[in-house]
Structures are given as structure tokens and as C-alpha cells.
Image (spheres, rainbow, N blue to C red):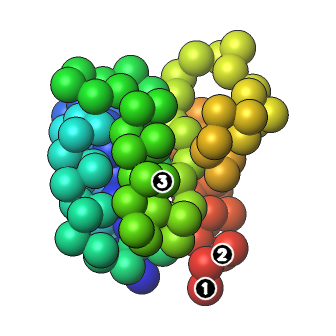
């Protein structure tokens, strides 16, 4: 299993990657939405993508739309990663994401995500 983490905050990126590595999940990391789109253009078979909303160069919403426009874009499950306490799962889905992960991501939520794809 391999996932993509799109997160501009290095501390958060490392923490999220470490959680998934503990679950024996391989991770690619993108520092912004534009890099996430470039990873997806390579048509890597990611089990899912975790995408921060607020990133430089291209935010998470723009990256989501760009990924969905790719030939294989519908194949990706993309979860919004946000620290915004007011953002709900319903809003994430309404905006085209497949679900919501709150920051800080914990191991239990990571295990729940992984279990959906095994």
C-alpha cells in the first residue's frame, strides 16, 4: 500500500508520514498542491491521498480539482487534512473530497483509513 501526503508544514508532514510508516504504509510527500498534481500525473497507484487545504502555489481545493481532471483522477480517494475545527466532513464531501481528517492526525484515524483499503 502506498499513499500521498500533500502538506506544506514540514512538522505535520513528518508526523503524518511517521504514523503511516508505523502501519507499514509507504508514503510519498508533496510540499504543495502543485507537487501533488505532478505525483498523480505519474499515475502512481496510491491507495489514497491526504491533502491539506491551505498550501502555497496551489491550495488543496485547486489540487483536488486538477487531480480529478486527470485521466485517472477519479481513481484517487482524496481526504482533506485540516486543523480548522469548524470544517465538517459534510463540507469536505460537498467540496469534492472523499472524507475529512482533523489535525493533528492520530494513529487511530490513520488505522481507520488504512482498514478501508486493505
Residue at x-position 61% and y-position 78% = 117
Distance CA(mark 1)–CA(mark 3): 23 Å
Determine the secondary structure under disc 3.
Answer: helix
Asked if marks 1 and 2 touch (Cβ < 8 Å), the reply is yes
Instruction: Tell me what residue is drawn at x 63 percent, y 42 percent.
Output: 96
Q: Nearer the viewer, residue 79 or 111?
A: 79
The front one of 61 and 102 is: 61
What is the number of the mark on residue 68? 3
- For disc 2, the marked residue is 115
Q: Name above or below for residue 24 compared with residue 84.
A: below
Q: Quadrant of the N terminus?
A: bottom left
Q: Earlier in the sequence, mark 3 or mark 2?
A: 3
Q: Is residue 54 above or below residue 37?
A: above
- Residue 95: quarter of image: top right
Q: Please name the residue that numbered disc 1 is placed on.
A: 118
Q: Residue 2, how many percent across, how many down?
A: 36, 75
**Where is residue 106 shown, x and y percent of the image?**
55, 46
**In what element is the residue under mark 1?**
loop
Amino acid at each position: 500500500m502506498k499513499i500521498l501526503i500533500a502538506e506544506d508544514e514540514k512538522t505535520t508532514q513528518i508526523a503524518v508520514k511517521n504514523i503511516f510508516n508505523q502501519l507499514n504504509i509507504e508514503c510519498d510527500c508533496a510540499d504543495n498542491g502543485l507537487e501533488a498534481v505532478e505525483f498523480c500525473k505519474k499515475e502512481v497507484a496510491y491507495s489514497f491521498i491526504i491533502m491539506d487545504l491551505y498550501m502555497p502555489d496551489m491550495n488543496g481545493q485547486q489540487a483536488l480539482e486538477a487531480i480529478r481532471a486527470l485521466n485517472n483522477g477519479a481513481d484517487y480517494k482524496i481526504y482533506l487534512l485540516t486543523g480548522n475545527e469548524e470544517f465538517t466532513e459534510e463540507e469536505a464531501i460537498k467540496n469534492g473530497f472523499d472524507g475529512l481528517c482533523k489535525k493533528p492526525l492520530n494513529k487511530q484515524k490513520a488505522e481507520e483509513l488504512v482498514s478501508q483499503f486493505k
